[in-house]
Image: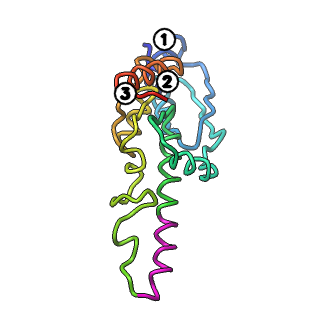
Amino acid sequence: MGTTDAKGLASSLLLRLAPTQRVIHPRSQQADGSLAARLALAGVQIHDPIAYDSTVANPAPVLAALTAPLAAITFTSGSAVTGFRAIVEKTTIRAAETQERRAAPTGRQSYRKKGNNVFGADTGNACQAIQNLLVASIGPTTSAVLQEQLRPPDIEAPVPSFAALAAAVAHALTQRNFSP
């Protein structure tokens, strides 16, 4: 049972709920609805209204942090991965468009066509921004989103908690002989 994803929650709830009971599960716009589907399949009356939307925040602090020397990046949710990727890719596109405008009068090759991003790498995606960092995930659900959207995490917390994630990052950085 101990998983913290929709499957684990559904399994735990199904042990305790009768099919005639009703459950409300307010969720994020980004949630996939798998919890509601699992419960409905078992006959539970589930209502899963969208209660909030995780949106991309101001990109400036993220981009500023990426220009400093970093050892690790931690992700504690799939929406954090998605938001990070959106910030980096949006900035990449803006930088490419600015460069294209500057290059147009002189006839130089388009920045976008070269595939460069704001981090000076010859790729076109957010993976480049974190390629040399220790990438840490709080658990399997977040790791799956990392795998899909950026790259596999270097480490995953042994149990999905902030304390376990912090300990795993500290241990991994010690193994890499990183000192702040």
Q: Which mark is residue 155?
A: 3
Pointer 2: residues within 10 angstroms few (<14), some, or many (20+)?
some
Of the image marks 1 and 3, the number of the one nearer the N terminus: 1
Residue type of the residue flagged with mark 1: Leu
Which quadrant of the view contains residue 110?
Answer: bottom left
Q: Which mark is residue 63?
A: none
In the displayed structure, 57 sits above or below 144; it is: below
Q: x, y percentage for residue 124?
A: 37, 60
Q: Residue furthest right?
A: 51
Q: x, y percentage for residue 159?
A: 44, 17
Name the front one of labels 1 and 3.
3
Name the front one of labels 2 and 1.
1
Q: x, y percentage for residue 86?
A: 50, 53
For marks 2 and 1, give the CA distance. 13 Å
Pointer 1: residues within 10 angstroms few (<14), some, or many (20+)?
few
Residue wearing tag 1: 15
Q: How many marks?
A: 3
| Residue closer to the observer: 19 or 112 | 112
For marks 1 and 3, give the CA distance. 32 Å
Which quadrant of the view contains residue 134?
Answer: top left
Label 3's element?
strand
Image point (59%, 39%), residue name? 28
Q: Which mark is residue 43?
A: 2
Residue type of the residue flagged with mark 2: Gly
Label 2's element?
loop
Pointer 3: residues within 10 angstroms few (<14), some, or many (20+)?
some
Q: Residue furthest top?
A: 16
Of the image marks 2 and 1, the number of the one nearer the N terminus: 1
Q: Which residues are magenta?
A: 93-106
| Residue closer to the observer: 46 or 32 | 32
